[in-house]
């Protein structure tokens, strides 16, 4: 499958409507981004079961900010709507293949249980400190707490 450019309006539906989505946050002026692009595109052809999305951080500044992008390129991997990998820096083809293999090999029942536990702990902590930290968020509950694979 070829890479697809997505916008902020398409981001959520892309993540929600597909089992595995890789997202490359990039910019035209970024040298490492331009070096990574052919690798990302070539690997995408080998995995028709994975959506390889690209987000132009210049055109989609709000989405990049909401995603916490502070360095580009940044690669994120989502599986069953859960962020399971996020790392800045260009990867070589073998490293990108390792990420894809690891994402495909995840025990998603275990991942969803981990996310549920994290959400419950965050909710309990928020309830225990409701008066102490009004206005503070319990943090992202997108699976980014999942241990490295």
Image: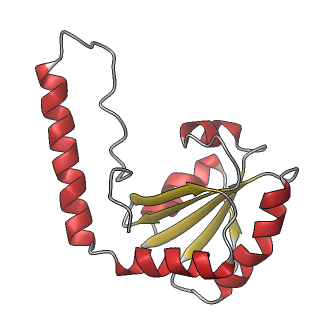
Residue 71 position, x and y percent, is 67, 45
Residue at 25% of width from left, 53% of height from top? 115
Residue 33 shown left or right of residue 88 in the figure: right
Instruction: Give the residue at x 62% y 47%.
Output: 8
Count of numbered labels shown in the rendering: 0
Image quadrant where residue 134 sits: top left
Using residue 82 as the reference point, say whether residue 128 is left or right of it: left
Q: Is residue 136 above or below residue 147?
A: above
Q: Where, quadrant-wise, is the C terminus in this rendering? A: bottom left
Residue 32 on image: x %, y %: 80, 59
Left or right: 66 as drawn, with respect to 123: right
- Write the residue at 37% across / 49% down: 142
Which quadrant of the figure has residue 46? bottom right
Q: What sort of colour scheme is used for the picture?
A: secondary structure
Q: Quadrant of the N terminus?
A: bottom right
Direction top: furthest residue: 131
The residue located at (56%, 40%) in the rendering is 68
- Report whether residue 1 is seen: no
Using the rendered view, name the quadrant where residue 2 is placed. Answer: bottom right
Q: Is residue 149 visible?
A: yes
Residue 117 vertical placement versus 70 (above, below): below
Query: In the displayed structure, would residue 82 be above or below residue 96?
Result: above
Residue 21, image x, y percentages: 51, 68
């Amino acid at each position: 499958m070829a890479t697809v450019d997505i916008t902020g309006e398409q981001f959520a539906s892309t993540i929600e409507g597909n089992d595995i989505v890789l997202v490359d946050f990039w910019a035209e002026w970024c040298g490492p981004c331009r070096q990574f692009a052919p690798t990302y595109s070539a690997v995408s052809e080998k995995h028709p079961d994975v959506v390889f999305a690209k987000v132009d951080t210049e055109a989609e500044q709000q989405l990049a900010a909401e995603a916490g992008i502070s360095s580009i390129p940044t690669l994120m991997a989502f599986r069953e709507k859960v962020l399971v990998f996020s790392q800045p820096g260009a990867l070589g083809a073998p490293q990108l293949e390792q990420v894809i293999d690891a994402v495909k090999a995840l025990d998603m029942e275990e991942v969803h249980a981990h996310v549920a536990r994290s959400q419950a702990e965050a909710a309990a902590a928020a309830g225990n400190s409701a008066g102490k930290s009004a206005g503070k968020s319990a943090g992202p509950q997108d699976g980014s707490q999942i241990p490295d694979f």
